[in-house]
Amino acid sequence: MKLMKFAALAAALVFGASEASAQDYPFRDITTAVVWGAGGGTDTINRMIMAEMEKHLPVSVSVINQTGGVAGSNGMVYVFNQPDDGYTLVGLSESNVTAAVQGGWDQKFSVWYPFIVGGSPDLISVPADSPYNTLEELIEAAKAAPGTIPAGASGSGSIHHLNLLALENGSEVTFKFIPYKGSAPSQEAALTGEVQLVVTSLAEQQPLIAGGKLRPLAMLTPDDATLGDTTIPTAFTAYPDLANYLPLKQAIGFAVHASAPANAKAVLTEAFEKAMASPTVAEWAKTNFYDLSGASGDEASAIFATLESTFAWTLWDLETAKVDPAELSIAKP
């Protein structure tokens, strides 16, 4: 009888401790593991937003990098294998939705409860010494020599690769796509002459454009963009059929396990919303050419589900996916 009472008391203590821990979240520091390299867009956004969220949390938030794998799969696997207690977040972007169909891991993106800070619009640029001064000149050259003009973008299935494909479809040309492991290497390839054009984001290109190393030809969005004294025209004016394929927008942010405790999600959501409403984030976005989102939870999950569907089936149709999206129950767009 005494043994049973002792066991009951121990169970009650354990339950009480667990309940208190859940109620007190967070009672220890939080770690965000970014799946892309230091200094990139996803890394920069996560370090910025975590610094702002930390102001509304009773603990510190550290940011580390867990890179490699397929479409950021190493970092996602690392975080997925951590306890789903809300203390390890994953810093990610829209390009991670292709990890499963490319064989990086066997999970759909629905295993995450995401938060979207925002993203920067893509554009097409050429080296400063390029013979092409307008998008029309580049397109005409591509029509004259299909599949011969080398074009750089981050790897197959990335947002930049899909924007390049959309440009090809909307203008009825074919470039010679050369994939790189990120935006920085693809931009460097343009500077060294390995490729004659590059598709990355305005946030990533703007220092190279301002420094006179890249010449912007067109935004791959419906609106023009202004960079200093330079107006970058939309590609939609010259090629209206692009509206059938674009725009495809970045969705950069972070996520917690979908199975994390409800109170952990609630605390993170409150800190995220307060951070997104801060003047610091607004000024950062303006300075760095990012469009803010602020979506979280179900709203952000719906956005990522659409991206996962679009990206996965595009790769499957291009015969570059290793896993049939249907096998993963990814709906067709």
Image (tube, rainbow, N blue to C red):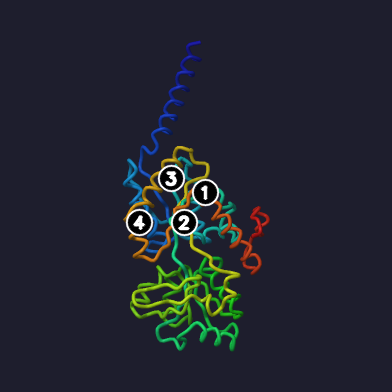
Q: What secondary structure is marked by label 3? A: helix
Disc 2 to disc 4, C-alpha distance:
18 Å
Q: Is residue 135 left or right of residue 169?
A: left
Residue 112 disc label: 1
Amino acid at the residue labelled 2: Leu
Disc 4 to disc 3, C-alpha distance:
16 Å
Give the foreground label among 1 and 3: 3
**Residue 10 in the image: x percent, y percent?**
45, 21
Disc 1 to disc 3, C-alpha distance:
14 Å
Q: Which residue is found at the position 56% from the left and 69% from the top?
A: 246
Residue 281 disc label: 4
Amino acid at the residue labelled 4: Val
Amino acid at the residue labelled 3: Thr
Amino acid at the residue labelled 1: Trp
Crowd around label 3: few <14 · some 14–19 · many ≥20 (10 Å): some
Q: What secondary structure is marked by label 4? A: helix
